[in-house]
Image: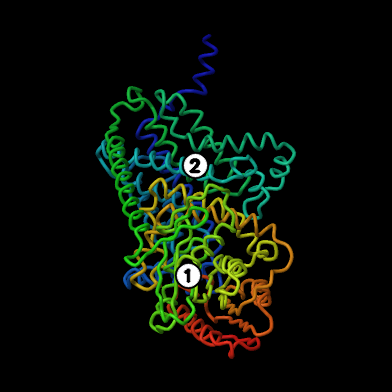
Amino acid sequence: MSIARKIASAFLGPIPVSRGRALGTSERLAAATALTSSLEYLSQRRQIRKGGFNDWSVARRAHADSSPVTRKLLDLVSGERTTTALHMARVAVSAGLLLPGDSRLRGAGSLFLGATALALYPRHRYGTDGSDQVSTLVQTAMGAARLSRSPTTQDALMWYVALQGNLSYVVAGWAKLLGTSWRDGTALGGIMRTRTYGHGPTYALTQKHPRAAKYLTHGVLALECLFPVAYLAGGRLAKPVIGAAAGFHLANGFVMGLGRFVTAFVAMHPAIAYTSAPKDHPSVAGRDDRVLKTAAVVFASAVSAAGAVAVHRRLRAIEGWPRSLRATTRHGNELQYEMNPGEPDRPVLVFATGMLSTSEHFGWITDTIRHDGRFGFLTYARAGYAGSRYRSKAPYRLAEAVDDLVDLVGAAVPADRDVVLVGHSLGGELARRAAARLGERVRAVVYLDSSHPGELNRSQQQSASAKPLGASLSLMVWSLRCGAGVLLARPGWLEALPAMFRKRVFDQYADARMWVAGHREWKAVESEFRAHTGELAAVTSHALVVSAQRTVDKDPEHLLMHHEIADAHRGAGRTVETVVLEGADHDSLLTDGRYGVEVGRLLLDFVTRTAEPAKTSERKEQTA
């Protein structure tokens, strides 16, 4: 029995480490990370010179919106000589911190390493990774703890590092859990076959022993998701949990080449060991745990505030505009839409959005049409977006969105008026399918950098980018459901929209409903587009196909597919035009006022010419 207890005590129980020992071990491990990091940067000085990956004359453009003072400081730090001098100083200070001792000067050294890491972070835009961020966190906390004479302050900083460590594992684990490859156990093999982090022999082992690879993958998930169990039962699981985590980082360092991650993340382990030991353990006698209660209160308050913000945004997102109307489709979906009637003898332009886009994305175009005053237009939110309700019980297919669009036209547009369907991205494909259903009511279809049903099979770029998209959308959905929307920064493209639309668009962008709808649509898109074969069906209406120059420059296959969309409309008496809008990309085609207004004018000109039969003659090719 005594032998069994000895074995159990060797693998179970808290890790006895005093405050001073935990502090010293953490600062030395963080110093080792800084030493390795700066030596790596010094050995690759060519990357900070003209033409290198971190050429400051290029990298500084990312800080164009910063204050003049910030830009001047960054320019000062980012000169080649200054950068080199700072790294040499970091090497000297890091080496000094690896020596024995517990002088308060060590705290100043750790703070220097943390401060210089922050100053150099923009300089090394490419190459800086999570290990540098973690070591900076540890250095600043341990530096402040070393300089403080108060045990209470030191314990508070120890708890700060420990809580950050627990959070890093838990968040990483639950984020992985959303990925299909992690749940089915194939993630390890997938990572080991990549060029960046792969390792041939390990990949071969995962293929030779798939069951063991699956168990190992699930073990990593369990370790990260359940890392805080190290604190349960008086820290009885601290040894296996912390030991497994250290082994995990050592394996990553060897197999994936992430050497700095070993010392960076393990530098948080002494604080975790110190705080996970029961308070009556002799090694932690007198430890002050009040910060834990404070953190719990702050966390609860933050969750409540995040929930309140999420509810407030949800209510604003579904409220709609004062002029918003509603229509119910055959699937039971309730669509929210806005209608500007225009002249009664003119066609109505019906706008269909892309995936994960709002009707307000068409703001520059619809403003141009409104100011023209001749044509009516209708914008709407697909089921699940904004104030539109998704109530269908059947498995979602793109045909349902097409049915909804057809039903909306029938309900909202007077029967004696023609329509022009205008679709961006996925909206273009939905408009193409709806045009065949609406028949003679459709005067024309306008495609704005439209999707093509064969793009995932024909475009290598599209196919590659599609693979991780599902996992990314799942992560966004669950993050926003957990209240993380309060942490979302306003994206740059949002500020390019007309001012009156920005707040409403951000409310939708930060609301889980839009991402749930987008994820639902994406699963249908991926399934149906990958199954697409054959040519596009003929559409008996006029057509204007607008391509964004940057889209077709990155992937010429897109231009070929856009021409195929145009070809599907060709026929006697039909006008088919193709336009490549110079300088625009897939999104700025709508969101940037320069391009949005130009698209609006192109659209008005095209619809004006095709509104009279006498002017619907032969094809016209055009590049703007």
Extreme residue toward the bottom, this view: 614
Considering the image in quadrants, where does the C terminus appear?
A: bottom right
Relative side of 284 to 362, left or right: left
Pinpoint residue 224: horizontal percent, then vertical percent: 50, 38
Amino acid type shown at disc 2: Trp
The answer to whether residue 321 is visible is yes
**Label 1: which secondary element:** helix
Extreme residue toward the top, this view: 1
Which residue is nearer to you in this view: 262 or 557?
A: 557
Which residue is nearer to you in this view: 294 or 518?
A: 518
Q: Is residue 252 above or below residue 232?
A: below
| Among numbered discs 2 and 1, the one appearing first in the sequence | 1
In which quarter of the view is residue 273 placed? Answer: top left
In which quarter of the view is residue 189 placed? Answer: top right
Residue at which label 1 appears: 59
What residue is at 52 percent from the left and 23 percent from the top?
A: 11
Pinpoint residue 561: horizontal percent, then vertical percent: 67, 72
Q: Nearer the viewer, mark 2 or mark 1?
A: 2
Q: Are marks 2 and 1 in contact (CB under 8 Å)?
A: no
Relative side of 261 to 537, left or right: left
Which residue is nearer to you in this view: 512 or 15?
A: 512
What residue is at 48 percent from the left and 82 percent from the top?
A: 598
**Label 2: which secondary element:** helix
Amino acid type shown at disc 1: Ala
Pinpoint residue 123: horizontal percent, then vertical percent: 45, 65
What residue is at 34 percent from the left and 38 percent from the top?
A: 159
The answer to whether residue 548 is visible is no
What residue is at 53 percent from the left and 70 percent from the top?
A: 424
How far apart are the two marked residues, 2 and 1, measured between alpha carbons?
A: 33 Å
Residue at which label 2 appears: 174
Q: Is residue 468 above or below residue 406?
A: above
